[in-house]
Image (cartoon, helix red, strand yellow):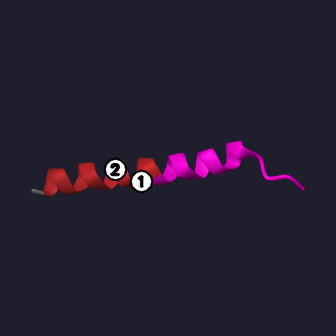
Amino acid sequence: KQRPLLVLAEELESDVLAMLVLNKHRAGIK
């Protein structure tokens, strides 16, 4: 079975989103 690039892209996107949310959260605490 071939692993579609879309799946990889989605995983990367969620990682980036998580980092953005974390950064916003940290900025809000300061």
Q: CA distance from mark 1 to mark 2?
A: 5 Å
Instruction: Say left or right for 12 vs 3.
Output: left
Task: Give the residue drawn at x 34%, y 48%.
Answer: 20
> For numbered disc 1, what is the local secondary structure?
helix
Instruction: Say left or right for 3 vs 10.
Output: right
Range drawn in magenta = 1-15
For residue 1, which numbered disc appears in the image? none
* Front-most of residues 29 and 6: 6
Q: Which residue is mark 1?
A: 18
* Front-most of residues 28 and 15: 15
Residue 26 picture quarter: bottom left
Location of residue 21 in the rendering, given as x and y in whole percent from the top left corner: 34, 50
Instruction: Say left or right for 24 vs 5.
Output: left
For the residues bearing labels 1 and 2, Cβ distance under 8 angstroms: yes
Q: Residue furthest top?
A: 6
Task: Give the residue drawn at x 14%, y 57%.
Answer: 29
Task: Give the residue drawn at x 27%, y 53%.
Answer: 23
Image quadrant holding the C terminus, namely: bottom left
Location of residue 17 in the rendering, given as x and y in whole percent from the top left corner: 43, 47
Q: Which residue is mark 2?
A: 21
Amino acid at the residue labelled 1: Ala
